[in-house]
Image (cartoon, helix red, strand yellow):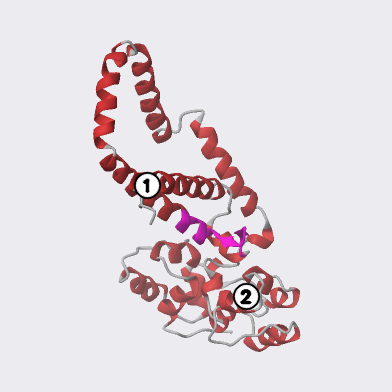
Amino acid sequence: MTRFRARGFVSLLSTFTFIISLVSGIVLYFPPQGKVAHWINWTFWGLDKETWGALHINSSLILFIVIIFHFYLNWNILINYIKKRAQAAINLKVELAISLLFSLFIIIASIYSVQPFKQIIDWNEGVKDYWAAKTEAQPPVPHAEEMTVEEFCEELEIPVEKFENRMKKNNWAFERSQTIKEIAQANDIAPADIYNEPQVKSEQGAGAGAGWGRMTVPEVCEKNNIRVEVALAELKKLGVNPEESQTIRDISSELKMRPYEVIKIITGETFEH
């Protein structure tokens, strides 16, 4: 029976996890921002952004653990190697100093956005801006794919019946309780395809013109016959002190909520359509 070689196993595992970490790190340099990636169902080699992120984190963690075991299994060899090289290192004072300084420069340059590392980050931002500039890639509201059919229609002021009719005409299977993302996955399409379906998009704002997220608190109050002071008081209870000029979308971002949830807080579940 072949004897299991721990050192060989650790060496091979460290190599493979390094490759996974390297490849996933490179891939994660290019995808759009999370909200856009979710909306257009961005994938690479069949894997979405979250999966690539999980691969990168897990492989990097395993690599870290494997390296510790590598030091443990080869500690004596490592110590002897250091002793043998200690004398030689004395003759590498200049090289040692330069390597330490360069390592320090990498840390400082990354923290304070110094070139050339700033350019690497700028390129990454450029990739995100490229995706963000695509109109069809932008969700109409943050986390729109996580809304149910009724929530989605309520937020965008789309009549639910007309939304459902368009889904049926496209033979897209769905249930009102499903989220837009679940419907998209069930029909092998992207959430953006559902919203960008011409007839659905044309229904947005059919009643009031603009979505709730673009309104300010006074505008919402006027639309629902609510005193502005009362609405602001309700929001203050949640720990925010919004200005009257702030949009519902800005307030929802501050509260880490969806715009329609903020509307419900202000109006007490009362909506005018």
Q: Which amino acid does label 1 sit on?
A: Val
Q: How many labels does the image show?
A: 2
Which class describes the residues within 10 Å of circle 1: few (<14), some (14-19), or many (20+)? some
Place of residue 240 in the rendered image (x, y in percent of width and height, measured from the top left): 34, 64
Name the image quarter holding residue 210: bottom right
Q: Which residue is drawn at 28% across and 12% down?
A: 90
Q: Earlier in the sequence, mark 2 or mark 1?
A: 1
Q: What stretch is highlighted in magenta?
A: 41-55
Which class describes the residues within 10 Å of circle 2: few (<14), some (14-19), or many (20+)? many
Identify the residue under disc 2.
184
SS at mark 2? helix
2 or 1: mark nearer the eye? 1
Place of residue 123 in the rendered image (x, y in percent of width and height, measured from the top left): 58, 39
97 in the magenta segment: no
- Would you say the residues marked 2 and 1 are in contact, meaning their CB atoms lie under 8 Å apart? no
Place of residue 13 in the rendered image (x, y in percent of width and height, measured from the top left): 42, 49
Q: In this view, does 67 lie above or below 114?
A: below
Front residue of 239 and 111: 111
Q: Is residue 6 above or below residue 179?
A: above
Left or right: residue 80 versus residue 222 is left
Identify the residue under disc 1.
10
Mark drawn on residue 119: none
SS at mark 1? helix
Place of residue 10 in the rendered image (x, y in percent of width and height, measured from the top left): 37, 47
